[in-house]
Image (cartoon, rainbow, N blue to C red):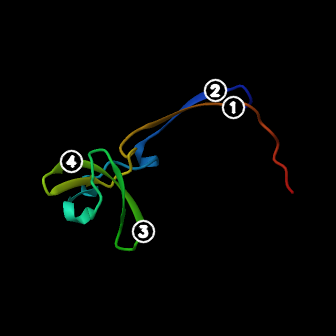
């Protein structure tokens, strides 16, 4: 593309954040949240078995059972990017 050109690009889930995986939705006990008060739609941080931070979205609360979705929020979605090239400069080496 050159300066002034515009284009629209679509990226399928397979090339972006993957398909939504139902196995990434887990039901946890309220006690698993400690002093936190989960609310539907809240993004919370959890640690996986390796200690890596893993965000999850609270989907449902049913008494002592809380359903958390660990899929990326854009999983299963086709992404559309509308771009405009403002300027093009030659590559320089330092």
Element type where label 2 sits in the image: strand
As rendered, which of 6 and 54 lies closer to the eye?
Answer: 54
Chain-order first, disc 2 or disc 1? 2
* Residue at screen point 14% across, 57% down: 64
Residue bearing mark 1: 85
Which class describes the residues within 10 Å of circle 1: few (<14), some (14-19), or many (20+)? few
Q: Which mark is residue 94?
A: none
Element type where label 1 sits in the image: loop
Image height check: is 73 above or below 3? below
Residue bearing mark 2: 6
Q: CA distance from mark 4 to mark 2?
A: 42 Å
Which class describes the residues within 10 Å of circle 4: few (<14), some (14-19), or many (20+)? some
- Could you tell me residue 68's position as x and y percent? 26, 54
- Could you tell me residue 40's position as x and y percent? 26, 45
In this rendering, which labeled residue sits more in front, label 4 or label 2? 4
**Quadrant in the picture for the C terminus:** bottom right
């Amino acid at each position: 593309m050159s300066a002034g050109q515009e284009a629209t690009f679509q990226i399928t889930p397979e090339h972006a954040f993957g398909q939504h995986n139902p196995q990434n939705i887990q039901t946890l006990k309220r006690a698993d949240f400690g002093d936190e008060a989960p609310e539907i739609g809240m993004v919370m941080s959890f640690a996986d078995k390796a200690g890596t931070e893993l965000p999850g979205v609270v989907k449902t609360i049913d008494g002592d059972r809380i359903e958390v979705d660990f899929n990326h929020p854009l999983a299963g979605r086709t992404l559309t990017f509308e771009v405009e090239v403002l300027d093009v400069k030659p590559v320089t080496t330092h």
